[in-house]
Amino acid sequence: MASASVHPLPPGSTIGIMGGGQLGRMTALAAARLGYKCHIFTPETDSPGEQVSAAATIADYEDRKALKSFAGSVDVVTFEFENVPAESAEYLAEHALVRPGAQCLAIAQDRLKEKDFINKTAPTTPYRKVTSAEDLAKAADEIGRPAVLKTSRMGYDGKGQVLIAPDCDYAAAWAAMGAEIGILEGFVDLDCEVSVITARSPHGGWVTYPAVENRHVNHILDTTLAPARLPGDLAEQAVAIAHDLADALDLVGLLAVEMFVTRDKRILVNELAPRPHNSGHWTMDACPTSQFEQLVRAVCGLPLGSVEAHHDAVMKNLIGDDVTGWPDLLADPGARLHLYGKAEARPGRKMGHVNRLYPKGQLPNG
Ligand code: AMP
């Protein structure tokens, strides 16, 4: 349809969001502040996104009838979840303006395609496609051990990952990964993990938040420190990489780029998410424009907002039972609490987050 349109969608327009999780919820809240309505498309009832949106379609992501009717009721479609089938995104694009385009999802939801794409612009750790235990043994000989075996699709928060140690039983590792197509990656000797979020408008204009440092516990993001404390020009390199990748994708919206910083001070790109990202939640309290407002601005063709942080920040995720600490957090004047409206605090489930602000240059050590 009008995918080449660069006319701004005025306040009062409706933004369709594929996915009903916390990222959709916070996008809908930011959209409401600017006078936009949101319509959530999700297979789940009572989702965090639906709770704060003007409308919801509860249907499978492959349901063509529901997709068509949803497309007809919104002015632009965006995503809070990159594993919406790329075919559904293509179908939506026949009936509505879709930002970012289906090509961005197709790349981000397949680790092999993603690594092939990234390597045209920025370095990654060495990797090989593997489709059997024999392939795995051969790839490990080529790449070296330790290495990490991952599913090529639908992997997140470390799910479907197996460490390939020097004394590996390849058949057992292949079975443990549990998918038909995998990717073997060289194990990165990490100094730290960083990410960068960039926003790109339909006019090709862009803004990029500073690089942040991410600390994981059990493969799930636990804490983000903003900005990342990186030596030399690594922070600028990280920002330039994110911008170049968003340009190469011809992306309209947000792109989060997860990167490894090696002990010998190189940046290797790990993965891409063409949507808001957990490591950008600090922007809600420390920047004039949050990542969620930035997404609204980008997909509606509005001027992009300032990414100049007025404070440094630490974002801590509330995972599972952590959320029971909400009364103490509310009583703490330094804590800015964000809860996602999820009824059940299952282990590993992201229930909310807390931002704490610090004068610039005064992030706590540790
Ligand atoms: P991913 O699902 O690719 O985001 O991986 C989850 C986490 O596992 C990352 O944030 C890293 O902490 C770790 N990890 C993933 N891939 C590698 C790798 N090739 N080398 C070292 N650590 C890794």
Image: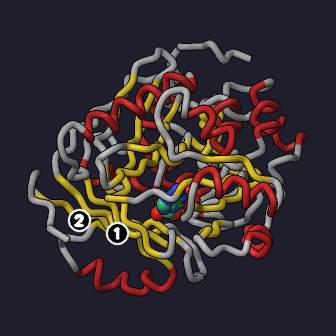
Q: Which residue is mark 1?
A: 316
Name the residue rendered at 63%, 42% in the picture. Answer: 108
Q: Is residue 187 above or below residue 353?
A: above
x then y, percent, for residue 211: 31, 45
Q: Secondary structure at mark 1?
A: strand
x then y, percent, for residue 109: 68, 46
Image mark for residue 69 = none
Q: Amino acid at mark 1?
A: Lys
Q: Dots 1 and 2: beta carbons under 8 Å? A: yes
Q: Nearer the viewer, mark 1 or mark 2?
A: 1
In the rendered structure, the answer to whether residue 128 lies left or right of residue 29 reads: right
Name the residue rendered at 80%, 24% in the picture. Answer: 94
Asked if residue 52 shows in the view, the reply is: no
- Look at the image and tell me in which quarter the N terminus lies: top right
Q: Which residue is mark 2?
A: 356
Name the residue rendered at 40%, 41% in the picture. Answer: 197
Q: CB of residue at label 1: within 8 Å of ligand 1?
A: no
x then y, percent, for residue 73: 73, 34
Q: Is residue 307 above or below residue 130?
A: above
Q: Nearer the viewer, residue 82 or 93?
A: 82
Q: Nearer the viewer, residue 7 or 221?
A: 221
How far separated are the C-alphas under marks 1 and 2? Answer: 8 Å
